[in-house]
């Protein structure tokens, strides 16, 4: 049995508030799950992040309050946390008094999303994400699947095929393709099965459950779904490190397309599913047939 953890980066709506929508899945065989989870926990422990969710986008932001704390680098984790908390409380009060309600709301959200990481400097947070990405890159048993949609140039022959539909269908098809390729189709006992596990999110849960039922019934546009079972299972990303890894992969892909950042993506890209030395698991969906980004190249020349 193989578990494929799926998460997204960017918004699937057009135009939404991102240039790209990325849906990424990282699949691991269940017999490697314990070891993988233990490896991630080991890195988290060293950064005092045992109970924290790895939310890559929030971790890699700059936190201005840290720069205001004198001698931040030389303080203990508790001292850093206290010092940043004081500054943040002060800022919330200031915004409340000045009646800047929209800014107050976004600032509160920002503080809530980053509160688990304020004891780490920006370079430590970056080092943490790098270590996790290097670990994922070393998992020879893991496979990365992803659809990266350029929403500015998105066109479709059928209005029902939204970026979200398209991305989910692609990831399901590629996971199915992989499971079929590693199965022994002549021996029932050696057939590989998989299940999709998603971050819990009410809107996505309903949509993807319905889509998966349809794929079970009639297949995707590309193939029958013989090796994936069940509709997606939904888990709380705060509690499940493996969904956080899918989040990291989706983030790395989107940053590559939107900002040209390659460093993080290169660390995990060896996990992209390949056939005959060509990447088949990850696709750049754009209008140009002649895109020569390294992802498009890896689909023709090898990754
Ligand atoms: Zn490309």
Image (spheres, rainbow, N blue to C red):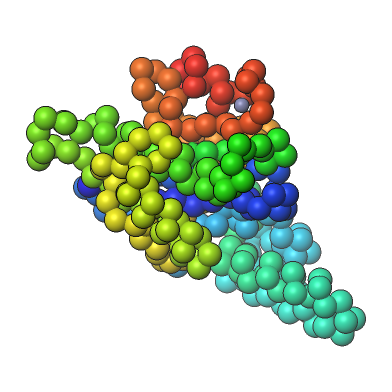
Residue 54 visible within the image: yes
Q: Nearer the viewer, residue 161 or 258?
A: 161
Q: Position of residue 255 (x, y in %)?
A: 64, 41
Residue 246 visible within the image: no
On screen, residue 173 versus residue 100, left or right, reads left
Q: Position of residue 142 (x, y in %)?
A: 34, 39
Quarter of image, res 21:
top right
Q: Nearer the viewer, residue 171 or 10?
A: 171
On screen, residue 247 versus residue 73, left or right, reads left
Quarter of image, res 90:
bottom right
Residue reaching furthest right?
A: 98
296 relative to 148, above or below: above
Residue reaching furthest top?
A: 301
How many marks overall? 0
Image quadrant of ligand 1 equals: top right
Residue beneath the point at 74% across and 69% down: 106
Residue beneath the point at 43% across and 37% down: 221
Q: Nearer the viewer, residue 152 or 113?
A: 152
171 relative to 239, above or below: above
Q: Position of residue 138 (x, y in %)?
A: 38, 35
On screen, residue 61 versus residue 219, left or right, reads right
């Amino acid at each position: 049995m193989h578990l494929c953890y799926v998460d997204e980066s960017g918004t699937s709506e057009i135009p939404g508030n991102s240039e790209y929508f990325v849906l990424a899945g990282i699949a691991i065989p269940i017999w490697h799950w314990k070891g993988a989870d233990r490896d991630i926990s080991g890195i988290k422990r060293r950064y005092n992040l045992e109970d924290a969710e790895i939310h890559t986008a929030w971790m890699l932001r700059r936190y201005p309050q840290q720069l205001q704390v004198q001698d931040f680098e030389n303080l203990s984790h508790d001292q850093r946390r206290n010092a940043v908390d004081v500054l943040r409380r002060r800022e919330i009060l200031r915004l409340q008094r000045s009646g800047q309600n929209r800014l107050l709301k976004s600032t509160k959200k920002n503080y809530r999303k980053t509160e688990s990481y304020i004891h780490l400097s920006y370079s430590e947070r970056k080092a943490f994400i790098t270590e996790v990405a290097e670990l994922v890159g070393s998992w020879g048993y893991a496979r990365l699947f992803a659809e990266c949609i350029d929403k500015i140039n998105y066109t479709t022959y059928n209005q029902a095929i939204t970026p979200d539909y398209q991305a989910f269908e692609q990831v399901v098809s590629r996971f199915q393709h992989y499971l079929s390729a590693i199965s022994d189709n002549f021996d029932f006992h050696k057939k590989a099965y998989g299940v999709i596990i998603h971050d819990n999110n009410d809107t996505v849960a309903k949509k993807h459950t319905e889509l998966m039922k349809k794929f079970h019934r009639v297949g995707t546009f590309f193939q029958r779904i013989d090796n994936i079972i069940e509709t997606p299972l939904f888990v709380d990303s705060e509690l499940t490190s493996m969904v956080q890894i899918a989040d990291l992969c989706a983030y790395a892909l989107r940053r590559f397309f939107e900002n040209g950042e390659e460093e993080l993506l290169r660390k995990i890209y060896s996990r992209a599913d390949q056939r005959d030395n060509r990447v088949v698991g990850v696709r750049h969906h754009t209008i140009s047939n002649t895109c020569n980004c390294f992802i498009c190249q890896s689909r023709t020349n090898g990754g």
